[in-house]
Amino acid sequence: MIKNTWVNLPVKSLNDSVEFFEKLGFKFNKQFDATNMLLNDNTMVTLVEEPQFKEFAQKEVADTKTTAEAVLVLQIESKDAVNELVDKAISLGAKETRDPHEHGPMFGRSFEDLDGHVWEVFFMNEDEMSKNDEC
């Protein structure tokens, strides 16, 4: 069974990306050349400068201006926390990629980080989900 999840993301500037995510409140383990951003006890995002990423992946790095490589999704604790995180990301140079959206008990917003990676941040009201299941 899976013990941990590691997502590797190419970045143009490791220092700029680390600063961006630290200001959003993420913690890092900086013991290696690449930098591990800790999402929770079992999930890490490894920020890797593009030349190293290209060598590791043995493929070209996606041009995030024209190509979506992936959508990274984070579930957080409240609608207010979603707004706070995305608003802060935008104030640090991120770009909101779509309007806030609400689907029943779920609320989400999306942004592109400094390197164009798309992050979907959402809250799911699990109490509402339970009520909807009973219908």
Image: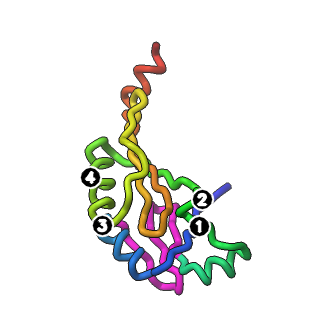
Q: Is residue 4 left or right of residue 20?
A: right
Which residue is label 4 attached to? 84
Residue pictured at 68% horizontal, 55% vertical: 1
Amino acid tagged 2? Thr
Other residues around mark 1 within 10 Å, as few (<14) / some (14–19) / many (≥20):
few
Amino acid tagged 1? Asp
- Disc with the residue nearer the chain's start (3 vs 4): 4
Residue pictured at 46% horizontal, 55% vertical: 119
Does residue 98 sit above or below 27 in this rendering?
above
Mark 3 or 1, which is nearer the eye?
1
- Looking at the rendering, the stretch of residues picked out in magenta corresponds to 25-47
Does residue 36 sit above or below 51 in this rendering?
above
Q: Is label 2 in contact with label 1 (beta carbons under 8 Å)?
A: yes
Residue 84, percent from left and from top: 26, 52
Q: Which mark is residue 92?
A: 3
Mark 2 or 3, which is nearer the eye?
2
Amino acid tagged 3? Leu
Q: Which mark is residue 63?
A: 1
- Quarter of the view holding residue 86: bottom left
Give the Cα distance between marks 3 and 4: 12 Å
Magenta span: chief secondary structure: strand
* Front-lying residue, 61 or 84: 61
